[in-house]
Image (cartoon, coloured by chain):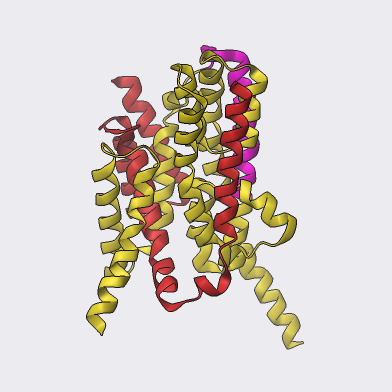
Chain colours: A red, B yellow
Amino acid sequence: MTWAAILLTSAGCYVLKLAGLLVPRHWLEQPTVARVAALLPVALLAALAAIQTFADDTRLVVDARLAGVAAAVVALLLRAPFLVVVAVAAGTAAAVRALG
Amino acid sequence: MTSVTAAAGDAARWQEVRGPVLRQAASVGIATGAYGLSFGALATTSGLTVTQACALSVLTFSGGSQFALIGVLGSGGSIVSGSGSAVLLGARNMLYGARLAAPLHLVGWRRAVGAQLVIDESTAVALGAEDRGDRAARLGFWATGVAVFVLWNLATLIGAVAGTAIGDPRDYGLDAAVPAAFIALVAPRLRSLPSWLTAVAATAVALAVVPVVPAGVPVLLAALVPVLAVLVFKERAQ
């Protein structure tokens, strides 16, 4: 029973991943689709960052993650390298949790 | 002679691209992979065997979908509702694949293998590297995908065997590290008014719908922002 669920879920998830990669190239090269595709990374990355900062399943919460992300934004504005930005976020969130 | 110099120049430029992309892949891989510990521990407390937990991480390889499935199964839900919500959560991977198809242009076995690695993190690093060329996007995709795959599966095994004895990744702030990485990846793209407006609108849409749609769907709805923007401005232009 559990194995059936595992295999069903895995098959479904894999088919979706593969289906995206199989979208025909000429379709992606249409001008309208190409313009959407150009803006899509910004939309996806911004939405993922927001969701991972504020969402707890289907609730919005403010917790130590926000402090970590805010510190990371400051590091970005100070032109810190990528690894420093990520480390500042983790360190700040960990410190806020340890203190809270 | 000229071509030798040009080739040397290309090689030097590639060195400058490769290092940063690999560092992004490594840090995102570590921060995300560590969550396999939580998944493994939660999977076995939800009634899965160690083998089942590991099989799920290898075969499904989509964190959100995996947590959803064990959540439903653990609370006594049916296979249909468990797998259904898990697959719905993975629907955004199809969108990622469609967006990545052109820069990655995978064929044959690489497409079959690469498909399994289409997840939030590999997509984020690939798209972040894309403005330095398709080669950088491909490196970002494969390096991040493989790093997350290896670490996520290793961590699942450790978490499933050790249970909750191992600390929570959140104690180390890793839950803030991943969104911070995504912001660092989007920041260089925020150079024009349309890109700022897209980022703000996508953020607003995603957060607004979090309480009313299943997890995983907000990112899909945020992807409608550029679709609407392009359609609206196209009509105005005509």
Up-down: is B220 above or below B83?
A: below
Q: Is residue B3 left or right of residue B28?
A: right
Q: Residue B42: x and y, percent?
A: 51, 19
Residue appearing at x 47%, y 47% in the figure? B91
Q: Residue at x 69, y 52 (%)?
A: B112
Quarter of the image for residue B49 reads top right
- Report the magenta residues as a range: B143-166
Residue A2 covered by magenta stretch? no
Q: Which quarter of the picture shows residue A22?
A: bottom right
Chief SS of the magenta region = helix
Residue B137 on image: x %, y %: 57, 61
Question: Which residue appears at 61% of the width and 63% of the height?
Answer: B104
Asked whether A73 or A44 is in front, the reply is A44
* Total residue callouts: 0
In which image quadrant can residue B52 be found?
top right
Q: Is residue B149 magenta?
A: yes
| In this view, A35 is above or below B184 | below
Q: Height in image: B50 above or below A70?
A: above
> The N terminus of chain B is located in which quarter?
bottom right
**Image coordinates for residue A36, horizontal then vertical, percent:** 39, 68
> Which residue lies most toward the bottom here?
B2
Instruction: Please state which of residues B192 and B200 is positioned toward the viewer in this rendering.
Output: B200
Where's residue B79, x and y in %? 52, 26
